[in-house]
Image (spheres, grey):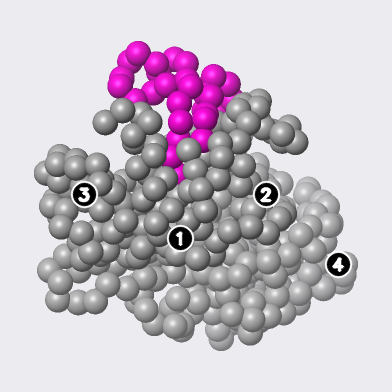
Amino acid sequence: MLGNEVRASFLSFFRSRGHEVVASASIVPAGDPTLMFTNAGMVQFKDIFLGNTEAAHSRVANSQKCLRISGKHNDLEEVGRDTYHHTLFEMLGNWSFGDYFKAETIPWAWELLTEVWGLPKERLWVTVFNGDAYEGVDPDFDARRLWQEVTDIDHSHILDFDKDDEALNGTVFEGQNRLKLYVTCRPGRDDYERYIYTEYVIYPAYNVLTDLSFRARPVRVTYVDTSGEDDTFTSNAFILEHKDQMAARNGATPIELAQLHPASISQADAALVEVFNYAIGMTDYSGVFMHNIEPIRSMDGTLIPVSYDFDWSGTIDARYAEPNPSLPIRNVRERIFQGFCRQDLDYGQIFDHFTEKREEMLSVIRNFGGLEEDRRDRVIDYWEDFFEMAADEGDQEDILRNCRKMPG
């Protein structure tokens, strides 16, 4: 088939299915300072996608002239290396503005390719989006099912593809290739689903206080029984950056230590960690035996503790969390300071820092949609109790009264 025949048959196919055929827009976009040239068929519809204007038709088809020699879509370096990169070309497209979706598009695509254009079915392959853990997006099970049910494509020719690394650009995990996945031990149970997202929200609040903290991102994890015996289901989880990445981001290096004398580390950073753990009701940590603490070394040799793993905190108040029997508290919601006595340190500055960051930290909780309102309010109330104490000098002294004596 010649190019004119391909274009004409494509537009005719979708016209017969209720699409309005529109002309190619100018190759130099009008009124769009973000683009030098039209580089995709959707350019003339940007204002519709952005909600700036209403669509004149719910179904549209077009053949758009595109030029890719600048910006993100610059194909100049790829031309000649393969058979499908070009600088000037036409892009065929069918568009639905609130009308149809995959259930119509997939069988139409198969019909166009195999019946109208006569392409051999055995040589056709399709790709299905395999999900994006970073964005909390599930795999596209609907698309895979439709390809299997409404077409006669060879099922082995349906491939699962992830996003490329560019999908991480601009996110907290840009440039990272090692991450830790935190999942609930009892996925599907409502209380445990709440626990894992409550633990997640502690991390971005910690990030507000200091960059010397792990970055996290909430995700939804889909569990698939490959034997087919159990149903597929999706559960809450979150991803934590690798300690090497956290250290590098702070111009430091990770170190492995089984034990550390509390006087040998940065006293201000250690005190911040200890007060933060008091704020969230966390006693299940040790700055001496590196329990739920990751040490890193700065460029000048200073040792810095970084706290993580907060599921036994009073903020979460998990049913399985119990305080150490040696502590004079009855449950994890009762706070007790587990830090060391640092006589030469001005704790007033540390409490002032918490007070300054109060609204920003609470906003992290308020703005996270993964928690139910009552759960969110309970966390906020718990933290508000601490912030009230942090703003009062008498309460500050009461908090520090339980500090532990520095070992000799």
Q: Residues within 10 Å of mark 1 (few under 14, many from 20)?
A: few
- Marks 4 and 2, how far apart in space? 49 Å
Q: Does the magenta stretch include residue 82?
A: yes
**Residue drawn at (54%, 64%) of the image:** 98
Nearer the observer: mark 4 or 2; the answer is 2
| Cβ–Cβ under 8 Å for marks 4 and 2 | no
Q: Is residue 6 magenta?
A: no
- 10 is higher (above) or lower (below) than 394: above
Residue pointed to by mark 2: 47
Nearer the observer: mark 4 or 3; the answer is 3
Q: Find numbered disc 3 in the image and state the secondary structure of the residue it sits on.
A: helix
Quadrant in which residue 387 is drawn: bottom right
Nearer the observer: mark 1 or 4; the answer is 1
- Marks 1 and 4, how far apart in space? 66 Å
Which stretch is magenta? 64-93
Residue pointed to by mark 3: 115
Q: Tag 2 or tag 4, which sits nearer the N-term?
A: 2
Nearer the observer: mark 1 or 2; the answer is 1
**Given the image, on which type of amino acid does mark 2 rest?**
Asp
Q: Left or right: where does residue 276 sit relative to residue 139?
A: right
Residue pointed to by mark 1: 18
Nearer the observer: mark 3 or 2; the answer is 3
| Cβ–Cβ under 8 Å for marks 1 and 4 | no
